[in-house]
Image (cartoon, helix red, strand yellow):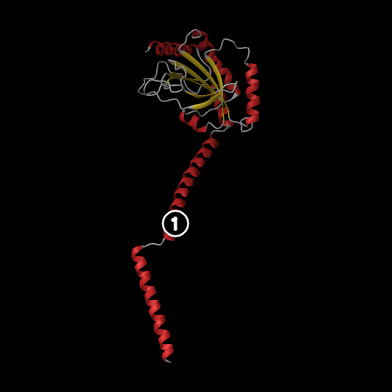
Amino acid sequence: MLRVNRVINQARASISACQQLRNHEQRLFPLPPQHFARKSFNRFLDIYKLASKEEIEKERARLADEMNRGYFADMSELKQHGGKIGMANKILIPTIAARKFPSVDVTYPDGRKLKLPIVFNENGVDTDKLAVLKASLVCLSFRANSREMVDSWCKPFYETFNDCKNVQLYEVSFIDSWLLCLSPIKWLLLRFLRKSSDGDKDTLQRQIVYSFGDHYYFRKELNILNLLSGYIFLLDKFGRVRWQGFGLATPNELSSLLSCTTLLLERK
């Protein structure tokens, strides 16, 4: 009996010592390491869910936007105004109201790549060591039918400023088909386009380039909705939109474009 009582007392003493040791550890470490790991992981999940939620909402808004602006809606508008979404500016847009032209990656038919627009940085130095000219006309075409509209602006502009070294003309064709954006198909397409333009020997300042891939957010920044129309932007050397036109050019609009370009060339 005494031996049993001795064993019970030793067990009670051991339990009491363990409890004291546990209480001491809790005072030193109020939360176990597993708690910190679990808390960090939960915080990561919350951030991930928040980012995913924002991306989902962003894609939903884009899907709704594109559903409202399908091919048939663009075609209906084209029949109404022939691609003339609005009238071109008559004078230069003041610098304080001019917006920056969003950057876009383009590819030449020979495979060279470039980011438009080419502008001065804050120190007035071209970071890409490329020629930064006083005026650039950027003509955007998203569908083949808008090429005629773009040409109605480009040809007179090029004929007028062909001998000017401070003007650049970019004709940008956007290709968003996933098939044509595949590397092998893209390479073959550029090779074909390079051969078809080999005969143009007087296009030193007329740059014909192509942009592959998704351009939804680029178009959104420029408020471009109808993809069947042509869009014309006159930029200064800082990449600001100083003049804008749409669709087929009219004689009065061409006159305003040429006069606005001349004004940019005359400025220092």
Residue at figure coordinates x 52%, y 8% from the top left: 159
**Image quadrant where one finds the C terminus:** top left
| Spot occupied by residue 203 in the image (x, y as percentages of width and height) | 56, 12
Q: Disc 1 marks which amino acid?
A: Ala
- Residue 147 vs residue 247, the one in the foreground: 147
| Spot occupied by residue 99 in the image (x, y as percentages of width and height) | 40, 25
Q: Residue furthest bottom?
A: 1
Residue at figure coordinates x 51%, y 38% from the top left: 62
- Residue 21 vs residue 45, the one in the foreground: 21
- Compared to 180, does 155 lie above or below? above
| Spot occupied by residue 198 in the image (x, y as percentages of width and height) | 63, 14
- Residue 203 vs residue 82, the one in the foreground: 203
- Residue 210 vs residue 5, the one in the foreground: 5
Residue at figure coordinates x 60%, y 23% from the top left: 144
Residue at figure coordinates x 59%, y 10% from the top left: 201
Packing grade of label 1 (10 A; few <14, some 14-19, many >=20) is few
The residue wearing badge 1 is 37
